[in-house]
Amino acid sequence: MIPVEFEYKKAKTLDDALTALSSGNSKVLAGGHSLIPAMKLRLNQPALLVDIANIPALKGIREENGEIVINAATTHGDIERSKLIKEKLPFFNAAASMIGDVQVRNKGTIGGSLAHADPSADWPALVLASDASIEVASTSGNRTIHATDFFNGLFSTALQENEIITAVRIPIPAAGAKSVYLKFENPASRFAVVGCAVLRLATKQTSIAFTGVADYAFRDTNAETAVSGKNLDEDTINDAVNAAVFGVNVLSDNFASEDYRKHLAQVYLRRALQAVS
Protein backbone atom coordinates (compact mmCIF):
# COMPACT_ATOMS: atom_id res chain seq x y z
CA MET A 1 0.00 0.00 0.00
CA ILE A 2 1.12 3.58 -0.64
CA PRO A 3 1.20 6.10 2.26
CA VAL A 4 -1.16 9.06 2.26
CA GLU A 5 0.31 12.35 1.06
CA PHE A 6 2.70 14.07 3.48
CA GLU A 7 5.27 16.86 3.59
CA TYR A 8 8.94 16.27 4.27
CA LYS A 9 11.46 18.50 6.06
CA LYS A 10 15.14 17.73 6.47
CA ALA A 11 16.11 19.40 9.73
CA LYS A 12 19.63 20.84 10.00
CA THR A 13 19.62 21.55 13.75
CA LEU A 14 17.76 20.31 16.81
CA ASP A 15 15.98 23.65 17.18
CA ASP A 16 14.94 23.43 13.54
CA ALA A 17 13.45 19.97 14.15
CA LEU A 18 11.66 20.97 17.35
CA THR A 19 10.09 23.99 15.69
CA ALA A 20 8.83 21.85 12.81
CA LEU A 21 7.39 19.25 15.17
CA SER A 22 5.46 21.85 17.12
CA SER A 23 3.39 22.74 14.05
CA GLY A 24 0.91 19.88 14.35
CA ASN A 25 0.47 16.36 13.00
CA SER A 26 4.13 15.48 12.53
CA LYS A 27 6.52 12.59 13.12
CA VAL A 28 10.26 12.27 13.55
CA LEU A 29 12.12 10.29 10.88
CA ALA A 30 15.56 8.86 11.67
CA GLY A 31 16.26 5.33 10.42
CA GLY A 32 12.61 4.88 9.41
CA HIS A 33 12.51 1.11 9.90
CA SER A 34 9.38 1.24 12.04
CA LEU A 35 7.68 4.42 10.87
CA ILE A 36 7.79 3.87 7.08
CA PRO A 37 6.20 0.38 7.16
CA ALA A 38 3.46 1.75 9.45
CA MET A 39 2.85 4.60 7.01
CA LYS A 40 2.66 2.18 4.09
CA LEU A 41 -0.03 0.27 5.95
CA ARG A 42 -1.70 3.61 6.79
CA LEU A 43 -1.51 2.76 10.48
CA ASN A 44 0.29 6.07 10.89
CA GLN A 45 -0.64 9.11 8.78
CA PRO A 46 1.49 12.13 9.71
CA ALA A 47 1.07 15.31 7.69
CA LEU A 48 4.77 16.11 8.09
CA LEU A 49 7.92 14.02 8.40
CA VAL A 50 10.84 15.74 10.11
CA ASP A 51 14.12 14.05 9.18
CA ILE A 52 16.64 14.29 12.05
CA ALA A 53 19.08 11.64 10.79
CA ASN A 54 21.87 14.07 9.89
CA ILE A 55 21.76 16.56 12.75
CA PRO A 56 25.33 16.57 14.11
CA ALA A 57 24.24 17.24 17.71
CA LEU A 58 22.20 14.03 17.71
CA LYS A 59 25.07 11.76 16.67
CA GLY A 60 28.02 10.30 18.52
CA ILE A 61 29.15 8.44 21.63
CA ARG A 62 31.21 9.92 24.45
CA GLU A 63 32.25 9.43 28.06
CA GLU A 64 31.12 12.20 30.39
CA ASN A 65 31.00 12.48 34.20
CA GLY A 66 31.10 8.74 34.81
CA GLU A 67 28.51 7.99 32.13
CA ILE A 68 28.47 6.84 28.54
CA VAL A 69 26.33 9.23 26.49
CA ILE A 70 24.87 7.83 23.28
CA ASN A 71 23.18 10.51 21.21
CA ALA A 72 19.79 9.53 19.83
CA ALA A 73 20.60 9.40 16.09
CA THR A 74 23.58 7.10 16.68
CA THR A 75 23.04 3.93 14.67
CA HIS A 76 23.11 0.37 15.94
CA GLY A 77 26.19 -0.14 13.77
CA ASP A 78 27.96 2.81 15.40
CA ILE A 79 27.34 1.22 18.80
CA GLU A 80 28.49 -2.18 17.57
CA ARG A 81 31.78 -0.72 16.26
CA SER A 82 32.49 1.63 19.19
CA LYS A 83 35.66 0.78 21.12
CA LEU A 84 34.38 2.86 24.05
CA ILE A 85 31.15 0.83 24.22
CA LYS A 86 33.04 -2.44 23.92
CA GLU A 87 35.31 -1.45 26.82
CA LYS A 88 32.75 0.11 29.17
CA LEU A 89 29.40 -1.48 28.21
CA PRO A 90 30.17 -4.78 26.47
CA PHE A 91 26.58 -6.01 26.57
CA PHE A 92 25.51 -2.95 24.55
CA ASN A 93 28.12 -3.88 21.97
CA ALA A 94 26.88 -7.47 21.89
CA ALA A 95 23.22 -6.43 21.65
CA ALA A 96 23.90 -4.09 18.75
CA SER A 97 25.46 -6.94 16.77
CA MET A 98 22.26 -8.99 17.18
CA ILE A 99 19.92 -6.40 15.66
CA GLY A 100 18.49 -7.13 12.21
CA ASP A 101 20.99 -7.27 9.37
CA VAL A 102 23.83 -5.00 8.22
CA GLN A 103 21.47 -2.59 6.45
CA VAL A 104 19.25 -2.24 9.52
CA ARG A 105 22.22 -1.75 11.83
CA ASN A 106 23.69 0.95 9.61
CA LYS A 107 20.46 2.98 9.36
CA GLY A 108 18.41 2.24 12.47
CA THR A 109 19.03 4.39 15.55
CA ILE A 110 18.91 3.78 19.28
CA GLY A 111 16.66 6.81 19.80
CA GLY A 112 14.21 5.64 17.19
CA SER A 113 14.05 2.17 18.71
CA LEU A 114 13.39 3.51 22.20
CA ALA A 115 10.75 5.99 21.02
CA HIS A 116 8.92 3.31 19.02
CA ALA A 117 9.02 0.95 22.03
CA ASP A 118 8.34 -2.25 20.15
CA PRO A 119 7.70 -4.93 22.80
CA SER A 120 10.28 -7.17 21.09
CA ALA A 121 13.02 -4.57 20.55
CA ASP A 122 16.43 -5.12 22.14
CA TRP A 123 17.44 -1.68 23.43
CA PRO A 124 14.65 -1.32 26.02
CA ALA A 125 16.01 -4.28 28.00
CA LEU A 126 19.55 -2.87 27.85
CA VAL A 127 18.66 0.62 29.08
CA LEU A 128 16.54 -0.84 31.88
CA ALA A 129 19.22 -3.26 33.10
CA SER A 130 21.89 -0.55 32.96
CA ASP A 131 19.79 1.95 34.96
CA ALA A 132 20.02 4.45 32.12
CA SER A 133 18.30 7.80 31.73
CA ILE A 134 16.76 9.16 28.55
CA GLU A 135 17.11 12.84 27.71
CA VAL A 136 14.30 14.46 25.71
CA ALA A 137 13.68 17.93 24.31
CA SER A 138 10.80 20.03 22.98
CA THR A 139 10.19 23.71 22.33
CA SER A 140 9.08 23.89 25.99
CA GLY A 141 12.47 22.76 27.28
CA ASN A 142 14.47 19.67 28.20
CA ARG A 143 13.86 16.89 30.71
CA THR A 144 15.32 13.55 31.75
CA ILE A 145 13.27 10.36 32.11
CA HIS A 146 14.62 7.39 34.03
CA ALA A 147 14.43 4.19 31.96
CA THR A 148 12.17 2.51 34.52
CA ASP A 149 9.62 5.31 34.00
CA PHE A 150 9.92 5.47 30.22
CA PHE A 151 8.08 2.37 28.95
CA ASN A 152 4.44 2.24 30.00
CA GLY A 153 2.48 0.17 27.49
CA LEU A 154 2.34 -1.47 24.09
CA PHE A 155 4.28 0.87 21.75
CA SER A 156 3.76 3.49 24.46
CA THR A 157 6.26 5.63 26.36
CA ALA A 158 6.45 8.66 28.63
CA LEU A 159 7.36 10.87 25.64
CA GLN A 160 4.99 13.80 25.27
CA GLU A 161 3.68 15.11 21.97
CA ASN A 162 6.40 16.86 19.96
CA GLU A 163 9.25 15.70 22.22
CA ILE A 164 12.42 14.22 20.71
CA ILE A 165 14.83 11.84 22.40
CA THR A 166 18.22 13.55 22.28
CA ALA A 167 20.49 11.14 24.18
CA VAL A 168 20.75 8.10 26.42
CA ARG A 169 22.95 8.32 29.51
CA ILE A 170 24.28 5.06 30.96
CA PRO A 171 26.22 4.97 34.24
CA ILE A 172 29.57 3.25 33.70
CA PRO A 173 29.64 0.13 35.90
CA ALA A 174 32.47 0.00 38.42
CA ALA A 175 35.39 -2.37 37.93
CA GLY A 176 34.44 -6.00 38.39
CA ALA A 177 30.96 -5.72 36.90
CA LYS A 178 29.74 -8.39 34.49
CA SER A 179 26.98 -8.03 31.93
CA VAL A 180 25.26 -10.07 29.25
CA TYR A 181 22.38 -9.87 26.79
CA LEU A 182 20.92 -13.08 25.42
CA LYS A 183 17.86 -13.61 23.27
CA PHE A 184 15.78 -16.20 21.48
CA GLU A 185 15.16 -14.43 18.21
CA ASN A 186 12.67 -14.55 15.40
CA PRO A 187 14.76 -16.09 12.59
CA ALA A 188 13.43 -13.67 9.97
CA SER A 189 13.38 -10.29 11.74
CA ARG A 190 15.83 -11.07 14.57
CA PHE A 191 13.45 -9.33 16.97
CA ALA A 192 13.47 -10.93 20.42
CA VAL A 193 10.81 -13.53 21.09
CA VAL A 194 12.43 -13.32 24.53
CA GLY A 195 15.47 -11.22 25.43
CA CYS A 196 17.18 -11.02 28.81
CA ALA A 197 19.72 -8.40 29.92
CA VAL A 198 21.65 -8.83 33.16
CA LEU A 199 24.12 -6.49 34.85
CA ARG A 200 25.83 -7.77 37.99
CA LEU A 201 28.04 -5.39 39.92
CA ALA A 202 31.03 -6.37 42.04
CA THR A 203 28.84 -5.65 45.07
CA LYS A 204 26.57 -8.50 43.86
CA GLN A 205 23.76 -6.03 43.15
CA THR A 206 22.03 -7.43 40.08
CA SER A 207 19.72 -5.85 37.49
CA ILE A 208 17.56 -8.08 35.31
CA ALA A 209 15.40 -6.87 32.42
CA PHE A 210 13.27 -8.67 29.86
CA THR A 211 12.02 -7.73 26.42
CA GLY A 212 9.66 -9.73 24.19
CA VAL A 213 7.88 -11.22 27.20
CA ALA A 214 5.13 -8.67 27.86
CA ASP A 215 3.49 -5.63 26.26
CA TYR A 216 6.62 -3.63 27.09
CA ALA A 217 10.10 -4.25 28.46
CA PHE A 218 10.43 -4.41 32.25
CA ARG A 219 12.81 -4.90 35.16
CA ASP A 220 12.10 -8.19 36.91
CA THR A 221 12.36 -7.10 40.53
CA ASN A 222 11.35 -10.53 41.90
CA ALA A 223 14.21 -12.24 40.11
CA GLU A 224 16.58 -9.41 41.11
CA THR A 225 15.70 -9.83 44.79
CA ALA A 226 16.43 -13.55 44.59
CA VAL A 227 20.05 -13.00 43.51
CA SER A 228 21.15 -9.52 44.62
CA GLY A 229 23.71 -9.63 47.41
CA LYS A 230 24.10 -13.40 47.11
CA ASN A 231 26.58 -15.74 45.49
CA LEU A 232 25.38 -17.07 42.15
CA ASP A 233 25.33 -20.75 43.03
CA GLU A 234 22.88 -23.29 41.64
CA ASP A 235 20.33 -22.78 44.42
CA THR A 236 20.32 -18.99 44.07
CA ILE A 237 19.97 -19.17 40.31
CA ASN A 238 17.10 -21.64 40.71
CA ASP A 239 15.38 -19.21 43.09
CA ALA A 240 15.68 -16.41 40.54
CA VAL A 241 14.42 -18.60 37.70
CA ASN A 242 11.41 -19.70 39.74
CA ALA A 243 10.63 -16.06 40.62
CA ALA A 244 11.01 -14.80 37.05
CA VAL A 245 8.05 -13.12 35.29
CA PHE A 246 5.80 -13.78 38.29
CA GLY A 247 2.60 -11.78 37.97
CA VAL A 248 3.49 -10.64 34.45
CA ASN A 249 0.88 -10.71 31.69
CA VAL A 250 2.96 -12.80 29.29
CA LEU A 251 2.36 -12.37 25.56
CA SER A 252 0.99 -15.13 23.37
CA ASP A 253 1.23 -14.89 19.57
CA ASN A 254 2.13 -16.81 16.42
CA PHE A 255 5.76 -17.07 17.49
CA ALA A 256 5.29 -18.37 21.03
CA SER A 257 2.44 -19.27 23.35
CA GLU A 258 2.22 -17.77 26.83
CA ASP A 259 3.55 -20.96 28.44
CA TYR A 260 6.41 -21.34 25.97
CA ARG A 261 7.39 -17.68 26.26
CA LYS A 262 7.50 -17.97 30.06
CA HIS A 263 9.61 -21.11 29.69
CA LEU A 264 11.99 -19.24 27.36
CA ALA A 265 12.27 -16.35 29.83
CA GLN A 266 13.31 -18.76 32.56
CA VAL A 267 15.77 -20.60 30.32
CA TYR A 268 17.43 -17.40 29.13
CA LEU A 269 17.56 -15.94 32.61
CA ARG A 270 19.35 -19.08 33.82
CA ARG A 271 21.86 -18.81 30.96
CA ALA A 272 22.39 -15.10 31.60
CA LEU A 273 22.98 -15.57 35.32
CA GLN A 274 25.39 -18.42 34.64
CA ALA A 275 27.25 -16.15 32.21
CA VAL A 276 27.81 -13.44 34.87
CA SER A 277 28.54 -15.82 37.77
Image (tube, rainbow, N blue to C red):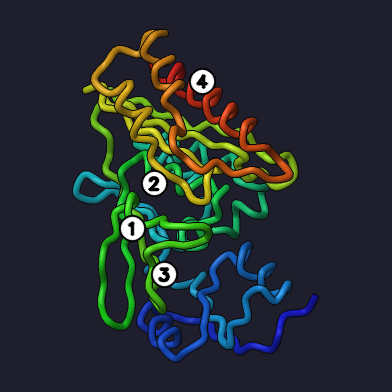
The answer to whether mark 4 and mark 1 are in CB contact below 8 A is no
Residue type indicated by callout 3? Pro
Q: Mark 1 points at which residue?
A: 134
Q: Label 1 to label 3, Cα distance in Å? A: 18 Å
Quarter the N terminus occupies: bottom right
Label 2 with label 1: CB-CB less than 8 Å: yes
Residue furthest to the top in view is 234
Marked residue nearer the N-terminal end (2 or 1): 2
Q: Is mark 1 on a helix, strand or loop?
A: strand
Q: Quadrant of the C terminus?
A: top left
**Cα distance, mark 4 to mark 1?**
29 Å
Whole-number angstrom distance, CA of label 2 to CA of label 1: 9 Å
Q: Residue 127 carries which label?
A: 2
Mark 4 → mark 3, Cα distance in angstroms: 39 Å
* Residue designated by label 4: 271
111 vs 175, nearest the viewer: 111
* Residue at figure coordinates x 54%, y 51% from the top left: 119
